[in-house]
Each structure stands twice: as C-alpha cells, then as structure tokens.
Image (cartoon, helix red, strand yellow):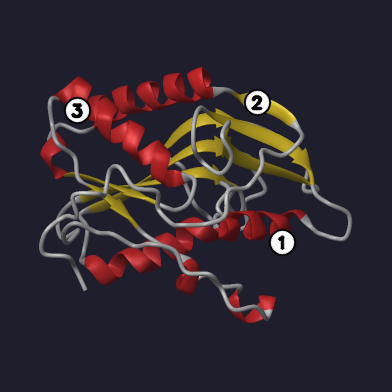
Amino acid sequence: MVDEEPPSSLLQESPARVPVQPVPDGRSVLDDLGIRRALMRIAHEIVEYHTDLSLLYIVAIPNGGVPLGRILVANLHQLGDVEVPLGILDTTLYRDDLTRTGKRPRLRKTEMPSSVDERVVILVEDVVSTGRTIRAAMDALMDFGRPQAVQVVALVDRGHRELPIKIDYVGKNIPTQLEEKVTLHGEAGGLDGALRVVVGEVAEGQNSRAADGNLRAEGAGGSL
C-alpha cells in the first residue's frame, strides 16, 4: 500500500534496526570526501539531463543506498532548488535467489511517500555487480505505480554483470575479482558516521555472491 503522507522520519532514521557491524579489513577505494564528490558530480549530471526536475523521485535500495540517497536529494535541492521525494524500497522478496538460499530472509524497511505514476524514478544503490538486485528493485517498484522512466545510480560498479542492466550514473568503476567483496561502511560501524568503500577478500568457504548477500542482510552495504 502507498502511504498517504510521507513519514516525518524518512530522511533522518536508519533504514532498519540491525546490529552494528564492525568495519572490515581491506583496502579503502573511496573515502567519505570521495563519496560526496562523486554524488555531487552525479547530481550535476542529473540536473543537466532532466529539464523538469519536479518529475524526479529518488528511490534508495537498503541498506547502503539509503545514506547515499539522502545525500543525493540534498545535492539536488542545492543545485536545482527542488524538493525531490525520497523513497526506500526493500527488494528482498523480489530476488531470484530466495529459493536457493534455504534461509528465511530478513525483511527491511520500505517507505514510499507517494505513487511513482508518471515520475522519473532514480534508483540509488551502493555497489552494483551482477545486476540482479537492480532487476528485483524494478519489479518491486511496479507495486507503487507506473513510472515514466527508471534510471539507476551506482556509487560503485564492480563489473561481473549477469543481466543486461545499464547504470546511468556511476560514481566510480572498480574492477574486481569474483573472490573479492566490495562494501560500503561507516566509520562508527554499520552505515553510521563518515562513509567509505572497502574491497576485501571473501572468507574461506564462501563465494563472493553469497558473502555480498549476507552482508546486505546484516546491515552493511554491498550488492549483486
């Protein structure tokens, strides 16, 4: 169901109450300043591309997409003097690997302040790899109306695409190995505090896709 009124806490609260996760070991490929610069550049690109900013509707994919979506909305307000709505859309039940994991998925918050009918929806994700999370987000989005168009923002595109998903606005392309994981973390743990993107090795006995899925469910960033 679509909320009649946007919750006042949408832009302030964490997308889900999950245990705080420690920042993992690994090499940092984007610090907080680099992330903010990338999101400001992306905001400029969005403003240049769209003639009617009032049609925009930012939809963040939790967990990592939510803090990025908040920054992007603030940047668009600064550049275009426009109040762009921010939604949060959980894709868990739309993933195509639910029957393969054998585990009960942890659902996260969905908060959509209004219908997406005739709006230009911009999905915001922290790390994109295979494209399956973006595909799931597009399926979930249709429950909230028929958008005029859908575009995708990715802070990091790590490659290894399995579906023909186009990223319209990319913060940084980072070539990776399949056995590596790429995650967005806050300095205070979870997604709190200054943000950074970390590339690290997957623990022995896990493949990179399973590890990404586990991290996503537990509150860190990272995507398929």
Q: What is the three-letter code of the residue carrying label 2?
A: Val
Q: Quadrant of residue 211?
A: bottom right
Helix, strand or loop status at disc 3? helix
Residue at point 10%, 64% (across, down): 4
Residue at point 62%, 81% (across, down): 99
From what the image shows, is residue 53 above or below residue 15?
above
Label for residue 210? 1
Helix, strand or loop status at disc 2? strand
Q: Earlier in the sequence, mark 1 or mark 2?
A: 2
Provide the residue designation for mark 3: 77
Q: CA distance from mark 1 to mark 2?
A: 22 Å
Q: What is the three-letter code of the residue carrying label 1?
A: Ala
**9 vs 161, nearest the viewer:** 9
From what the image shows, is residue 57 above or below residue 37?
below
Provide the residue designation for mark 2: 29
Left or right of 156 on screen, residue 77: left
Q: Are marks 1 and 3 in contact (CB under 8 Å)?
A: no
Q: What is the three-letter code of the residue carrying label 3?
A: His
Estimate the x, y position of residue 93 in percent, counting from the top left. 47, 74
Label 2: how many Cα within 10 Å (few below 14, some 14–19, many 20+): some
From what the image shows, is residue 137 above or below residue 222?
below
Q: Is residue 221 among what the camera can see?
A: yes
Residue at point 21%, 74% (across, down): 1
